[in-house]
Amino acid sequence: MCYFLDGAYARYQVYQTQALSQVQLNAIHKLPMIEFLKDPVVGRVSNIMVAPEHQSAFKKLLEHNRIDYIVANENVEE
């Protein structure tokens, strides 16, 4: 069970990616500013939490690596 400090995760978003290849997974793993909600596995979708100040750079990385995604949760704290 996860407990959030009041306001600690305001505007954090969760991105759900397509099933990832090893190359795509390696590209995402280089980022220190993300948190996988489950251990990532090649060939499966991933859910990744990203702080508000890193969302733009994260989306650019996904697009650069041709990783399809949806925003699964617009605001983790809500």
Image: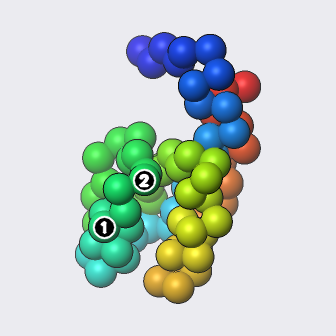
Which residue lies at the image location 56% right of the left edge and 57% below the top edge? 54
Q: Residues within 10 Å of mark 1 (few under 14, many from 20)?
A: few
Which secondary structure, mark 1? Answer: loop
User: Taking 16 as reference, is 70 left or right?
Assistant: right
Tell me if residue 29 comes above or below residue 10 in the rendering: below
Tell which of 66 and 43 is nearer to you: 66
Tell which of 8 and 15 is nearer to you: 8
Tell which of 20 and 27 is nearer to you: 27
Which secondary structure, mark 2? Answer: loop
Quickly name the residue at label 2: 33
Specify the quadrant of the image occupied by residue 24: bottom left
CB atoms of marks 1 and 2 within 8 Å: no
Tell me if residue 33 comes above or below residue 76 in the rendering: below
Tell which of 41 and 36 is nearer to you: 36
What amino acid does circle 2 point to?
Met
Specify the quadrant of the image occupied by residue 43: bottom left
Which residue lies at the image location 51% right of the left edge and 46% below the top edge? 49
Q: Which mark is residue 30?
A: 1
Residue 62: where, in percent of width, then height? Answer: 53, 74
Residue 48: where, in percent of width, then height? Answer: 48, 50
Q: Quadrant of the N terminus?
A: top left
What amino acid does circle 1 point to?
Lys
Whole-number angstrom distance, CA of label 1 to CA of label 2: 9 Å
Which residue lies at the image location 62% right of the left edge and 41% below the top edge? 12
Which residue lies at the image location 29% right of the left edge and 47% below the top edge? 39
Residue 58: where, in percent of width, then height? Answer: 54, 65
Tell me if residue 29 comes above or below residue 4 in the rendering: below
User: Taking 40 as reference, is 3 left or right?
Assistant: right
Q: Which mark is residue 75?
A: none
Is there any visible trace of residue 43 in the rendered image? no
